[in-house]
Image (cartoon, grey):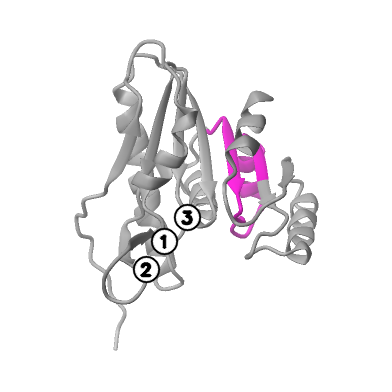
Amino acid sequence: MMDRHIKVSKTARYYVAGNPNNEIKNIWFLIHGYGQLAKYFLKDLEFLSAPDTILVAPEGLHRFYVEGFSGKVGASWMTKEDRENEISDYTNYLDKLYKEIKSNLKTSTPKLNILGFSQGAATAAQWLFNKKIKIDRLILWAGTLPNLNRERVKLLNSTTLYFVIGSKDQFINETQLTELSNYFDENEVRYRLIRFEGKHEIQKEVLKNLISAW
């Protein structure tokens, strides 16, 4: 039995809040976590809207029923199966979407801010690593990074990096957090660690406070 691949076309869904105009200064890419849908993820973060801001919420290319064979639907960015090809597919998708959004703006140099939540954090990092795009601010919320090397550290240090984690996160315990912090320090990653009282979730006030300090 041989493992083979074939390229196919696929229609990707995304949501946008905000209107292109000559005042746009910020593009936000909001990358959801495992089992979420972009529509609802964007609704939860619409408080980021402003006259000079475009919010973009891409949806993972793989949808599934969250429980059983019907009912609530969620989306995923990747699994352990055929992982490298899935990463290639979604980084190409995100790159094409970013170029399309930017081409519709009248301003030539808007800042690119990315918020990746949970699985979306690894997705955002892979986008940076694979496409080497210029990200002004990268927020990795309740998620971790893929393996680092010298080139990836250099790319991470080209952006302002925030790592945000709740004190009661069900998926990242204190031991894992310490190991991750040590990993960042050992690999000379420049970042700011932000802790908050909460679980595996985005808390609006925490995010608002983070942004207000820019």
Tag on residue 35? 1
**Label 1 sits on what residue type?**
Gly
Q: Label 3 belongs to which residue?
A: 33
Q: For the point 68% across and 52% down, which residue is it? A: 166
Discs 2/3, front? 2
Disc 3 is placed on an element classified as loop
> What is the C-alpha distance between the residues marked 2 and 3?
13 Å
Q: Residue at x 72, y 49 (%)?
A: 197
Q: Is 46 on the left or on the right of 213, as rendered?
A: left
Q: Which mark is residue 66?
A: 2
Residue 35 vertical placement versus 126 (above, below): below
Whole-angstrom CA distance, mark 1 to mark 2, is 7 Å
Please tell me which residue lies in front, 194 or 156. 194
Q: Quadrant of residue 207?
A: top right
| Residue 35 at x, y percent in the picture | 41, 61
Q: Earlier in the sequence, mark 2 or mark 3?
A: 3
Residue under the point 79% across and 59% down: 178
Q: Which contiguous range is marked in magenta?
A: 135-163
Residue 105: image tag: none
Element marked by disc 1 = loop
Label 3: few (<14), some (14–19) or many (≥20) C-alpha neighbours in 10 Å: many
Is residue 83 depicted above or below 88 in this figure?
A: below
Say if mark 3 contacts mark 1, CB within 8 Å: yes
The answer to whether residue 5 shows anywhere in this view is: yes
- Judging from the image, what secondary structure is the residue with disc 2 in? loop
Report the residue at 41% width, 11% height from top.
Answer: 23
